[in-house]
Image (cartoon, coloured by chain):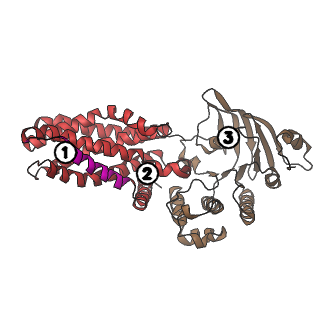
Amino acid sequence: MNFLNQTLLLLKKDLILEVRRRENLLTMFFFGTLLLFVFHFSFDLVPERVVEMAPGLLWLAFLFTGTLGLAQLFEAERGNHCLEALLLSPMDRGALFLAKTAFNFILMVLVEIVVIPLFWILFNLGSWDIIPHLFLVVLLGTIGFCVLGTLLSAVTLKARARELLLPLVLFPLMIPVILGTIRCMEAILRAGELGDALPWLRLLIGFDVIFLTVGILIFDWVIEV
Amino acid sequence: MRLTVRHLAKAYGLLWALKNVGLDLSAGEIVALLGPNGAGKTTFLKLLAGLISPTTGEILLDGSNFSRSAAVQRSTVGFLTPGEHLYEDLTVRENLIFFTSLYGKSRTIPQIDGVLQEVGLHHRSGEYVAALSSGMKCRLSIAKWKLLEPGLLLLDEPYGVLDGSGIDLLETFLKTQSQKGKVVIIASHHVARVLTLCTRAVILHQGGLTFNEARQQPWDSFTRAFGEFLPHGES
């Protein structure tokens, strides 16, 4: 069985388990929505300041929601020592990394599909035409988050109080992604295009490619029972 | 399948769980891996399974060095731990399909159902594993390794949850594996039971190998070596 088929098999298994348990997606969706309402009622944003604040708030919502999902990422494998069963098998461990990253990415995108339009309405961000551009930037940021998050989720898998440890390790390393996404989103909200924020977009793409490659290559050393 | 272990050792921090273990097993051997709690049996099995890396030493499968990163070699090693290594929210059949696919040994539904029939789970094939009893989960683990056919099969305390017919089923399976030239290693505290099945006994004590002998009749050397660990009532 080749690398891609292994990845798809593992991803399919995770999606089936998620459909049956309905734990991660529902929790992430409600938490993301709840955060938006908290932000909405906490900040009385005047139209002049909304462009400055909105990207940061939106990304904060994704960051917290995503961390919630990451904490549960290997939950299916923790029960019944299923991680041992996977590591015992001849599958490429990089395929496990890619499948988990893809699974986390799918959950995040499903949440974002609901949260972004809701955010638009709550903060009255004006024209809907720029949403596709904005969504593209968010996707790149989400890939970076999922790639690094999956890697660190595996690193902290055996740690005590991993739910506390994971954000402490993850957030500092996520700074390039957070900055890149916020700068790009800000530029799109101001002018409808990237303009000066293009280097930030390149940084995002570079981050995604580098950590995805590194993750696939080093996952074998990262994950041990 | 031939298994050779040379100077194998594993340390967890400053604690040596396994010290300088050497073993040479030829095709068809069924080995009873015995020793008191904390002797290093499970660590030894996990090292052989490639789940953890040794601190020192090497494991050779059919003469080639076994590394946990070698995917092809991993497919030749099976690890049966009763009730574990199964996804609770997948059905009995889905678990078997998933693992056989992962091992690149895709089986047809009739083949899978046939094995489920052999282990007495054909009527539960559509149920979630979470709904099975411990004994039934163990039967499912047996079905899984029947389908995957590893060259080296490791078992960690397989007897605890099985009923009489389940034990018969397991022992018949292990004898068949042995007849096919595969190596079986059973770690167990059910000494009397495992001794009737094994062709060799190995005793670990405080991480070291203290006894390694092919089965004989009578077996006074074993009785002497194992004497101090024998629980009351076992002989």
Sort mark 1 into few (<14), some (14-19) or many (20+) by Cα contacts within 10 Å.
few
Residue holding disc 1:
A41
For disc 1, the chain is A
Q: Nearer the viewer, mark 2 or mark 3?
A: 3
Query: What x and y, as percent, mark residue B197?
Result: 80, 55
Instruction: Confirm whether the magenta stretch covers residue A31.
Output: yes
Residue holding disc 3:
B44
Tell me the colour chain A is drawn in: red
> What's the distance in space between the residues labelled 2 and 3, CA to CA?
30 Å
The stretch in magenta equals A24-46
- A225 vs A99: above or below: above
Residue drawn at x 11%, y 34% as measured from the top left? A196
Q: Nearer the viewer, mark 1 or mark 2?
A: 1
Return the residue nearer the eye: A5 or B33: B33
Q: Nearer the viewer, mark 1 or mark 3?
A: 1
| Residue A34 visible from this viewpoint | yes
| Chain (brown) | B
Residue drawn at x 86%, y 50% as measured from the top left? B233
Give the residue type at disc 3. Answer: Phe
Query: What x and y, as percent, mark residue B88?
Result: 52, 58
Give the residue type at disc 1. Answer: Phe
Query: What x and y, as percent, mark residue B123?
Result: 59, 73
Residue holding disc 2:
A3
